[in-house]
Image (cartoon, rainbow, N blue to C red):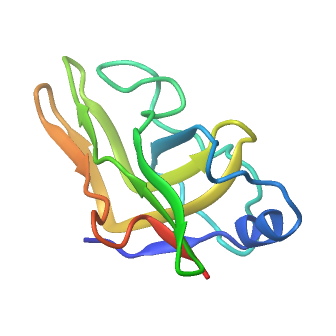
Amino acid sequence: MAIFQKYNAFIDALCSGGHNLKTAAYKVALTNTAPNAAVDTTFSAPPPAAANGYPSGGASPTVTSAATSGGVFTLKLQDTVFIASSGGIGPFRYVIVYNSTTSGLIGFYDYGSSLTLNATDTFTTDFDDANGVLTVQ
């Protein structure tokens, strides 16, 4: 599993009230354009075209928990499955998680090499069920 890396802009926005992590609508986008955690501020990386099983702007994961316990906020998202139809999806190397309410970037996973899904292939973003996508403490 790739390691989640937060964007600097996410931390900045979080500290200045730019994200409401409890009520935000999230998106999971695929892209082959390398993110720059230090510089990127809003979602604008060109994902694959909205076609062949890939929705515009990425998939909308279900929030399974966005709660604080013992002074630690944890965001848990349900795994997202992309299923390619004829024509396929990709190539992509990066999976970006962003707040679609504000287009604010949160973080990304780097899978190390580009992937392409052919018709009927699936790709699952396997979010950590125990520790969540991210914690704030």
| Residue 80 position by quadrant | top left
Residue at the (30%, 33%) spot, across then down: 89
Residue at the (64%, 38%) spot, across then down: 100
Q: Position of residue 74 (x, y in %)?
A: 49, 67
Residue at the (66%, 69%) spot, across then down: 7
Q: Position of residue 47 (x, y in %)?
A: 51, 38
Left/right placement of residue 85 relative to residue 57 reads left
**For the view shown, which residue lies furthest in the front direction?**
70
Q: Nearer the viewer, residue 114 or 29?
A: 29
Q: Nearer the viewer, residue 17 or 102?
A: 17
| Residue 84 position by quadrant | top left
**For the view shown, which residue lies furthest in the right direction?**
16
Q: Nearer the viewer, residue 42 or 133?
A: 133
Left/right placement of residue 83 relative to residue 5 reads left
Q: Position of residue 60 (x, y in %)?
A: 45, 34
Q: Nearer the viewer, residue 134 or 22?
A: 22
Measured along the vertical axis of the image, is residue 94 above or below residue 46?
Answer: below
Quadrant in which the N terminus is drawn: bottom left
- The count of marks equals 0
Measured along the vertical axis of the image, is residue 66 above or below residue 87?
Answer: below
Left/right placement of residue 70 relative to residue 52 reads right
Residue at the (43%, 64%) spot, across then down: 133
**For the view shown, which residue lies furthest in the left direction?**
120
Quadrant in which the C terminus is drawn: bottom right
Measured along the vertical axis of the image, is residue 134 above or below residue 59?
Answer: below
